[in-house]
Amino acid sequence: MIMNSVCAVVVTFHPDADVLKNLSKLPEQVERIVVVDNGSSREAISLLHAAELQLGFELIENHENLGIASALNIGIHWAESSGCKWIMLFDQDSAVTEGFMAAMLRVYEISPKHERLGLVAPRYVDKRSGAAIFQGATEDGTLETAMTSGSLMPVAIFRELGYFQEELFIDAVDYEYSLRLRDKGYFIEECSDAILLHSPGSPTIVRFCGIRLFQTANYSPLRRYYQDRNRVWVVRRYWKKFPIFCLKLFKYSLHEQIKTMLGESGKWDKCYYAALGIMDGLRGHMGKTDRL
């Protein structure tokens, strides 16, 4: 049994067999695993119960989709009550590689910013293409933000700074917490020796005469709503303290809109939902939407 006081918190939503393969790689690297399911089908829950017996993790069923932030918080509270010192967060589509956890913990030991290191992020590689997923850095070489999946954090951080913002429901949850950490004087470092295989979105490659022009994330209209709404929320809260990052966030959203119009199906629905999200973000209408 691994004795490193790390609890892996994995959020699932209608998982398939590939998710179970990802889960099977965790027991050899962490001490405890808690899977928080956000209202999956009975068939998916049956798969998780079978894996629970085989892999020895704790399964918490929400019976409805409470959102990623709420599910993460439920898992974190469970890890706290179990006496774990470290928390590692995962999406269901992420898979660790050999030596992942040891490399992540080593960063906390050797970092010159050890006392103010709030989060360690892995190096992300797209499962499908094998391409590295870029993460923006600050002037001192630390990261601006980190994705939720793969984040290693000390439990004490949550007791000091609070938990994930549940009113965001899904999307920008990672942006918000990363900025909260930095606002309180903590740093985010990347562990280049720890590789996490990740599958963001359902990308579509746009080509012209056989030449690749660009790639779109191809998110659903509902995801576009949450993405743009929550980016507005983040910008409204943090623009004074992190103006450059907030400008990048605005530019990224604009680029996504352009790529959607040029290369995705259902483009008008997606842009319409994104516009609704922006309006709700400006109005402060947060939480799980029932308007769409």
Image: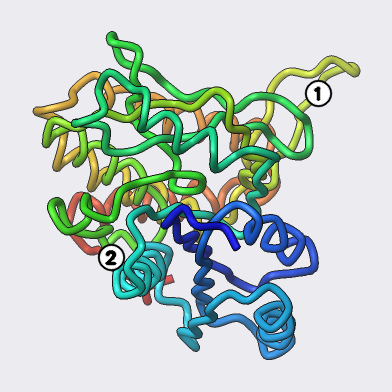
Give the side of residue 214 with respect to residue 275, left or right.
right
Which residue is most to the top? 139
Q: Secondary structure at mark 1?
A: strand
Between 13 and 222, the one nearer to me in the picture? 13
* Left/right of residue 69 with respect to residue 91 in the rendered view: left
Quadrant (top left, top right, bottom left, bottom right) of the C terminus:
bottom left
Per the model, the C-alpha gap separating discs 2 and 1 is 39 Å
Q: Is residue 164 left or right of residue 127?
A: left
- The disc, 2 or 1, on the residue closer to the chain's N-terminal end is 2
Residue 200: x percent and y percent? 61, 44
**Residue at horizontal 67%, vertical 40%?**
197
* x and y, in percent, of residue 180 in the image: 19, 41
Report the disc number at residue 207: 1
Q: Is residue 250 visible?
A: no
- Residue 72 position by quadrant: bottom left
Q: Residue at x 28, y 24 (%)?
A: 245
| Image coords of residue 110 (percent x, y) | 37, 23
Tag 2 secondary structure: helix
Residue type pointed to by label 1: Arg
Mark 2: amino acid: Glu
Badge 2 density bin: few <14, some 14–19, many ≥20, Cα 10 Å? some
The residue located at (46%, 53%) in the rendering is 4
Task: Find residue 142 and report its image quarter.
Answer: top left
Say which residue appears at 51% left-offset and 45% top-offset.
150
The answer to whether any part of residue 156 appears in the image is yes
Above or below for 111 versus 273: above
Which residue lies most toward the right here?
210
Q: Which residue is mark 2?
A: 166
